[in-house]
Image (cartoon, grey):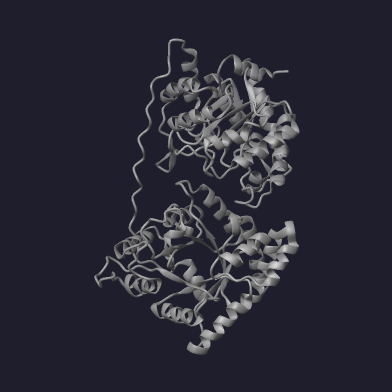
Amino acid sequence: MTHSFLQQLDARPLVCDGAMGTMIYSKGIPVEHCFDELNLSQPALIADIHRAYIDAGANVIETNTFGANRFKLGEFGLAADKVTEINRAGVRLARRVVDAAFKEVFIAGSVGPLGPRLAPLGRLSAAEARAAFQQQIAALVEAGADLLVFDTFTDLFELVQAVLAARDVSPDLPLVAQLTFTDDGRTPLGHTPQKVAATLADLALDVIGVNCSVGPAGVLRTLQSLAKALPAGTRLSAQPNAGWPERVGGRMMYPSSPEYFGDYALAFIEAGARLIGGCCGTTPEHITQMRAALDDPTRSAPALSRLPADEPARLSQSGALPPTRLARRLAAGGFIASVEMSPPKGFSAERVLAGAATLHAAGANVINVADSPRSRMRMSPWAVCHLIQTQLELETVLHFPTRGRNILRVQGDLLAAHALDVRNIFVVMGDPTNIGEYPEALDSYDVVPTGLIKLIKQGFNQGLDYGGELITQPTNFLVGCALNPTPADPAREIKVLRQKIENGADFALTQPLYDPADLTGFVARYEAEHGPLTLPLLAGMLPLYNARHADFLHNEVPGIHIPAEIRQRMRQAGENGAQEGVAMARELIRQLRPHVQGIYLMPAFDRYDLAAEVIEAAQAEEDRG
């Protein structure tokens, strides 16, 4: 039997409410407070917001339960048993307001993302996510929600788990699934509308749409793309923010006027939306204008042009600074857990930031950001470094290849990195362009890694450029170098390492190791020629994923040697290869710890969840030691 909500939706477009969080904040509740908990402690405040949206003409109001799952409530110190109580209260509170209004208004149980990321970006398994969603959804359904709205999902596959959980609880309840998209028309994790459509089309969904994201113009463009990719007749929804937020007087302000939303209400309907409303920054006034636009038979959708692009951000200048946290930790002899990440192929760094957050929580001290790994086009790494440092307060190491840069570019890029407070540098030659996707690209360079280390440590850090001219202020870079313990020509590797040290290298990252004897043997040979090796070493770790991965690295990647017994262990591990790789990495860390100051993890296939296991084990060993 068709649900009355869907019957109404098919008969005419319906208007949902606007932002709940914006309204709560406007009532004087600080953002540090758990908004969902207000269902219990300040129900009258939430009831007033629901009532204002109903009076504005909303046909659907969402419960104040967006973050009422066990993980987000746990961040506020609320026990998991509060999940059911808060969600039930959210529905019953909305029901009392609707009953008192004597209007036909549907109550949508609001379900948002869980907070922690699903593997491989995070450490939450699909089963754990599904169970958490089931707990919240069961409470919403039991309390009498008319439908469920999945709001502001950035991870398509987390949304899939939410939908599956909903169908476990109630096979027939109407479901509205909404993702958020950036201004380039992709989700923050890089999924296109076409990918979203292909994934969601086979699920038992009643409405698919876009919410939060950017302002109305961006949502309209994405909605149009989504409509083309989905089967004809799919019900769509659109609930944009009130434009790009701006900080004014310590508060976040949204520029889109209610009248502007009225214009776009008709444009959304013309694009195929059956359910429209607002997200962050919207108020009952915005909903009033959307309602008025739909109710006016003489009004038609205006021609709407694209918003002008934002002006590029300006770089701030930075002078000489105290040593970086990494420099201080190296000097103190502390253990360092470092992880390599690749920049995105696009300008959205959400996926990288999610992985970095997982690693930070596991105990990573620093993130190494690669530069065009395997000569493939990627976002410039210093931008990723800056985002990680500013958004996560986690220090980074910028990989800085000399290949492909002339001396002007080298110096300009160094100053740009320093201006962004990216001051840990890993100097390396870089991959040749002939192995990448642009083999015809220029591959020339003016300085080799040993020379660049000298330029930075004896030039820039002393206030001098390559030509000996003064720069405005001395820089304060910490410089790392590469070390291959299993070179084809050990004598040459030792000679080059000696040069790097003499030129001022502060630490070294090794190639991936699988046999402790490879490193200890190399160090012994170096010390026989030059005396004690005091340069701090971070041992390269590339945990094996399966037997095929091990064979590929051993046979096809220069500089990597994997002993036969290790490869045999991976074959014996079979389907448990990934966990066996983690176990071997943990063993190797224990064996190498007397000879190195830390580890340099290179997660295979972006399995940051596995890297997190290695880091946690290593940090636990340090705590016990």
**Percent x, y for residue 297?**
46, 10
**Percent x, y for residue 77?**
66, 48
Give the residue at the far left of this rendering: 469
The residue lying toward the viewer, choosing from 217 and 569, is: 569
The residue lying toward the viewer, choosing from 513 and 619, is: 513
Give the residue at the far top of this rendering: 298
Note whether 146 is above or below 511 in the view shown: above
Q: Residue at x 38, y 55 (%)?
A: 440
Residue 183 appearing in the image: yes
Q: Quadrant of the N terminus?
A: top right
Q: Residue at x 52, y 52 (%)?
A: 352
Q: Residue at x 68, y 67 (%)?
A: 567
Q: Residue at x 32, y 73 (%)?
A: 459
**Percent x, y for residue 342?**
50, 56
**Percent x, y for residue 199?**
61, 36
Note whether 133 is above or below 303 in the view shown: below
Q: Quadrant of residue 598?
A: bottom right
Residue 42 appearing in the image: no
Q: How many marks?
A: 0
Q: Quadrant of residue 419?
A: bottom left
Q: Quadrant of the C terminus?
A: bottom right
Q: State left or right for residue 26 relative to residue 319.
A: right
The residue lying toward the viewer, choosing from 63 and 101, is: 63
The residue lying toward the viewer, choosing from 313 and 507, is: 507
